[in-house]
Image (spheres, rainbow, N blue to C red):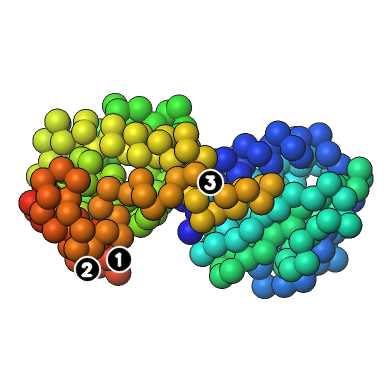
Amino acid sequence: MAELPEIFKLAGQMRDTLHGKTIQSITLLQEKCSNVPPDEFQERVSGARIKDIRNKGKWIITELNNGENILLSLGMGADILFFENEKNKPDKYQVKVVFSDGSGYTARFWWFGKFLLVSDEELASEPNTKDIGIDPFDERFTLDYFSSILKGKKTQIKAFLMNQKNVSGIGNMYMHDILFRARLHPQKRISDMNEDEIKLLYSSIMDILNFSLEKGTFAYESDFFGQKGGYTTDYFLVGYKENQPCPVCGEKIISIKTGSTTSYICPACQKV
Ligand SMILES: [Zn+2]
């Protein structure tokens, strides 16, 4: 499942490739992934030019020059693929966008993908995206900022970080190694964390996510051009490595239940 590094890379590739293109047509084969019917969608975007594409947490927002915005969520997984011309477009998709130069892209959702149309006026109050917190690749995500949002909180640290209203973009996959590098148990309470632990957690978030980006992001996700990333599971420290030795102390890595998620931890390095 795509998390911040994958979404950040995809949004960047979409921006570089599609900026300035004019939308000719939109095909919506699965109506339930959108908030407006196919005819209305087509009518409201046809002839509009792409002004900007950026991510907000795990959402990708395409801003058009006519006051409309396309909001894309990959849900539980999706392939968003560019094509130069319709002859070499992917066979399977639920959404297809074609530009006036003949190029375009398709979206194939595995589960719960969204492709919404929202006007500039509605954007600030759009229920899916209005409360999304600042993500770690946003320049506003400084150590001071991070410390400020933790202040006074009593929640368990993993639950806090998983909540997209607090910090957006981090999901279960990168979380294991982020907490391991910070030597934090997922159920540690924020109110029990000292300044050094917060500092270490901040740098761990930045290091793990940036390292994935450097390696071309997760190896099992396709980018806009169908290429897989280079961040393979070999780079994982403890994530999904049950019964294997901890890379720091050699203790056996275990998996534990943390609310609705599973967590991989080293029981010696990460004490509650
Ligand atoms: Zn250990």
Kindly state the secondary structure of the residue where label 3 is placed. Answer: loop
Kindly state the secondary structure of the residue where label 1 is placed. Answer: strand
Q: Foreground residue, 54 or 223?
A: 223
Q: Which mark is residue 261?
A: 1
Amino acid type shown at disc 2:
Lys
Question: Is 194 left, or right, of 174 in this rendering?
Answer: left
Q: Find residue 75 and report its horizontal and vertical position in percent.
A: 54, 62
Question: Is 20 left, or right, of 208 in this rendering?
Answer: right
> Which residue: 74% across, 49% down?
82
Q: Find residue 124 and report its horizontal and vertical position in percent.
A: 58, 45
Q: Which residue is mark 2?
A: 257
The answer to whether the residue bearing label 2 lies less than 8 angstroms from the nearest atom of ligand 1 is no
> Which residue: 27% across, 59% down?
241
Q: CA distance from mark 2 to mark 3?
A: 29 Å
Q: Residues within 10 Å of mark 2 (few under 14, many from 20)?
A: few
Q: Residues within 10 Å of mark 1 (few under 14, many from 20)?
A: few
Q: Quadrant of residue 221?
A: bottom right
Q: Find residue 150 and report its horizontal and vertical position in percent.
A: 24, 40
Amino acid type shown at disc 3:
Gly
Q: CA distance from mark 1 to mark 3?
A: 25 Å
Q: Earlier in the sequence, mark 1 or mark 3?
A: 3
Cβ atoms under marks 2 and 1 closer than 8 Å:
yes
Q: Which residue is mark 3?
A: 229
Disc nearest the viewer among 1 and 3: 3
Q: Earlier in the sequence, mark 2 or mark 3?
A: 3
Q: Is residue 143 visible?
A: yes
Amino acid type shown at disc 1:
Thr
